[in-house]
Image: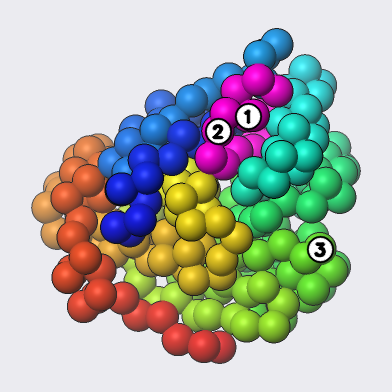
Amino acid sequence: MGRVRAARPLVHHITNYVTVNDCANVCICAGGSPVMTDGEDVADMVAISSATVVNIGTLNARTVASMEVAFGTASGKGIPMLLDPVGAGATTYRTEVAERLMGMHPTVIKGNAGEIGVLSGLGGDVKGVDSHGSSDVASAVETLARATGSIVVATGETDYVSDGSVTYRLENGTDMLGNVSGTGCMVSSVVGCYIGACGRSIEAVASAVTAFNIAAEVAVTRCGGPGTFRPALLDAMFNLDGETLDDRARCERA
């Protein structure tokens, strides 16, 4: 967290129009500097960025082409890149696009348990953009990480992160995250900050997810429901300190 805040990484996003503002704000609160562009200057913007985050939540042919340009540019320059395969498994098109982008070797693939189950080949249940159960999550992240060479994150009641050889189980978080749209997208932005500052590292990815979830635990004690949880979450992310992060983190080898 200290490295992220010191570096203030520029994180390029191609994300969905439902959550773009939340992603920009949480990126700032986590210590990064967000930029959201999916047009003609994508290649130039990615080239000067510390990381690029691609989210297929509201995909279409134009944005998919921009996503491919973003990943192609990032790959050529060694810039960390994250794929959030929102809704993979819900429709054939989403699954095909997710698989095409996975083939460009993103640094991190971050989805919910159902999406990761589908993409791993072990099976998952995705309705719309929500996960309603999956196969064994630890096995799914390990399998997909080995198959792709990416660090894989599956979020849910318990989160799992794997690079194919090491797998972490992350126990922080709150059920309130499921009552606000876009919290999964916000996690991707925070991970983008951490890999932008720290590079390809399973510890950086696990730290990002844990920091976000601890901020959510703090926020839920200061809100009256979903409507006030969102701003409380941004405040908690912004004000999170190292002592709180270290004291509250619940992370262990799976």
| In-image side of 130 versus 87 (left or right) | left
Residue 205 at x, y = what percent? 51, 63
The quadrant of the image that shows the N terminus is bottom left
Residue 46, which numbered label?
Answer: 1
Sequence-first tag of 3 and 1: 1
Up-down: is 23 above or below 105?
Answer: above
Q: Marks 3 and 2: which is nearer the front? A: 2
Rate crowding at label 3 as few (under 14), some (14 to 19) or many (20 or more) other CA atoms within 10 Å: many
Tell me where residue 179 appears, x and y as whole percent.
38, 49
In 3D space, how far apart are the residues under numbered discs 2 and 1 (Cα atoms)? Answer: 5 Å
Q: Pointers 2 and 1 in contact (CB under 8 A)?
A: yes
The span picked out in magenta is 43-60
Q: Residue 148 carries which label?
A: 3
Residue that label 2 marks: 49
Q: Residue at x 63, y 29 (%)?
A: 46
The residue depicted at 83 percent of the width and 46 percent of the height is: 104
Nearest the viewer among 247 and 120 is 247
Q: Is residue 24 visible?
A: yes
